[in-house]
Image: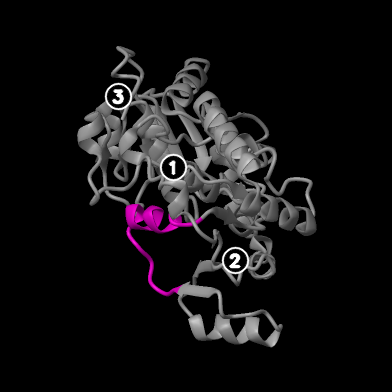
Amino acid sequence: MTTTNDAGRAFRLTVLNPGGRDRAQDFSLGEQQLDEREHAPLNFHGYAACTGGTFERDVTRALAARRPVLLLLRGDFKETQRALMRLKEAKLPVAISFKETGLHQIARQLADPKRAERFRMVAQMADGCLSATPEALAFYGQGEFIPTPYPISNRRWDFSRPAGERRGIFVGTREWGTPSRHHLAALVIAAGLGEPMTVFDEEPRRCRRLLGALGVPLDALRILEKRLPYRDYLAEMARHRIVLQADKSGVPGQVAGDALLCRLPCVGGDGAIERIAFPTTCGCGRSLGELADLAARLLRETDFYEEIVAQSQRLARERLSFEVVARQLEDFFAKL
């Protein structure tokens, strides 16, 4: 894993999730840090990883590190507020960010007036606001969008398989209860393409009954019931020819990020990573019918398939690599 430390740069970031469940993690060791027992260097862990920094849940450890802090808003924001006060007393530069950044998630967090007021107070007190999506900036009133990075240049995170071993469609969503995910739409599109398709669903009987009631052919449907460790999940995804989704939640875009690590095309989704790395096939401004047509082309046209994969990898290196995002983070915190 290349970090800014490896290039002789001094900037290291502490990402603090006060009282969160993920344990502390030090990313200064680079390649040695790639341990399956640890959290993958993705999402907010990715911000810490790309700078050779740390991910913390205890504000005391963040204070001891004496580094710039990205403070995550979680729960009722009370722990975030208390942590911010201590960090400011220590005169550390602090930016805040929602930990759950989908539009539906932000709306749920701010639905309570007291919590919304606490959020406003925290945003005003912080030195800056950093957003993993362009959409979330509207809630802060100030700040900067920096996409979550992916270890594209690290060969240990290359999960690609030979073209001859890729077959079928991997449905990237699994949430029935979140309308903006449009999970059913993705399943219906995938089923209409006449290829084997795989989906994760902890209630497989319900999934089959619902799709069967809609007349969706079930012969090609493969349902995986149990969640897999992240690296095993990527290995499963990589067996397929394309990743398909219809998500409209305005999320950072891990489905597309996972597809990048598998060197697969991602069809659909309006997340930040989807729009950056897959502009030709993302769901932004496209109908479900257009997504179905794009998926069909990728399944049958080798030249188009290779073009999209090459384009996505090039854009990821230019906009989403650890090296690029680390420089953006350093520049952002230097201005606070």
Return the x and y of residue 326 as percentages of the image width and height.
43, 23
Q: Nearer the viewer, residue 175 or 168?
A: 168
Amino acid on which disc 1 is placed:
Leu
Q: Secondary structure at mark 2?
A: loop
Tell me if residue 316 comes above or below residue 220 in the rendering: above
Q: Secondary structure at mark 3?
A: loop
Q: Nearer the viewer, residue 86 or 280?
A: 280
Q: Nearer the viewer, mark 3 or mark 1?
A: 1
Residue 257 lies in the magenta stretch: no
Tell me if residue 293 comes above or below residue 33 in the rendering: below
Q: Nearer the viewer, residue 327 or 295?
A: 295
Q: Are marks 3 and 1 in contact (CB under 8 Å)?
A: no
Return the x and y of residue 160 as percentages of the image width and height.
41, 45
Mark 3 to mark 1 CA distance (whole Å): 33 Å
Mark 2 to mark 3 CA distance (whole Å): 54 Å
Q: Is residue 263 visible?
A: yes
Q: Residue 195 bears which disc, if any?
A: 2
Compare marks 2 and 3 and give the one earlier in the sequence.
3
Q: Is residue 146 visible?
A: no
Are there few (<14), some (14-19), or many (20+) residues within 10 Å of tag 1? many
Q: Which residue is mark 1?
A: 261
State left or right for residue 58 relative to residue 242.
left
